[in-house]
Image (tube, rainbow, N blue to C red):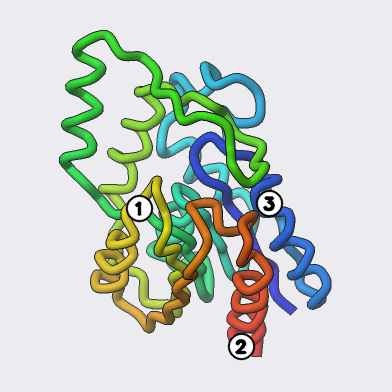
Amino acid sequence: MARVLCLHGLGGTGATMWPLVGHLASAHHTAFAPTLPGHGSDPLDLVGVTWDDWVEAAREWDADVVVGQSMGAVLALALASEGRVRGAVVINTLAADPDAIDGLEWRRSRGTTTIDVGPSTVGEVAYESLPIEALLAMHEGLATVDLAAVDVPVLIVTSVNDDVVDPASSDVVASALGGPVERLRLTTSGHVATLDGERDSVAYAIVDFVARLAR
């Protein structure tokens, strides 16, 4: 059986991944869904937290497979690029976007310190606002991930109705990876696919992917 690390997105908590952890445990895998630094308390606790802090937290648990949602997906790819895992699953991943960095810096230069994201529509335990500084840390960090160095199998899960991350980001990432890629497209889910209506389909696909790697 496999050890599976499950990583949430910016503003979320480990609870975002709990349904998936349950499915993995039922399949006799060992799964862990930590809450990343700066999360699970107050949005201002994200101020001063760096990309390296999040990557280092992800490195603390030795895993065979890493699964990530949104920012967690890019952290998963960072671990895979370092040769730390045998496979990765990325759910609604971001792609490097210099325009996003420019836009955030422009807003910060005009006095904006936080961006309201509103309450979750799927019951995610998550912040309803995010500091500009944390968003910049995420975008600047993901630009440093060497996708071509990811030579292990990767399952990319994409919600076509994602209104947070452009679904085309998944295509950009898929084309840049150095190893075999599988795709799963969700037709009704939004951004937080691990908690949305197709969450069981997502979990079954991930359990199957992990099982094949474990064999």
Is label 3 in a helix, a strand or a loop?
A: loop
Relative to 202, does residue 45 appear above or below in the rendering?
A: above
Q: Residue at x 52, y 54 (%)?
A: 69
Q: Residue at x 63, y 46 (%)?
A: 122
Question: Is residue 104 visible in the rendered structure shown here?
Answer: yes
Relative to 23, does residue 120 appear above or below in the rendering?
A: above
Q: Which residue type does callout 3 highlight?
A: Ala
Count residues near mark 1 (Cα–Cα under 10 Å), then give few for <14, some for 14-19, many for 20+. many
Q: Which residue type does callout 1 highlight?
A: Leu
Marks 2 and 1: which is nearer the front? 1
What residue did someone put label 3 on? 33
> Which x, y percent locates residue 187?
47, 69
Quadrant into which the N terminus falls: bottom right
Is label 1 in a helix, a strand or a loop?
A: loop
Count residues near mark 2 (Cα–Cα under 10 Å), then give few for <14, some for 14-19, many for 20+. few
What mark, if any, has residue 94 been given in the picture? 1
> Which x, y percent locates residue 144?
28, 49
Residue at the top extreme, as displayed: 111
What residue did someone put label 2 on? 212
The image quadrant that residue 162 belongs to is bottom left
Question: Is residue 148 visible in the rendered structure shown here?
Answer: no
What mark, if any, has residue 62 been given in the picture? none
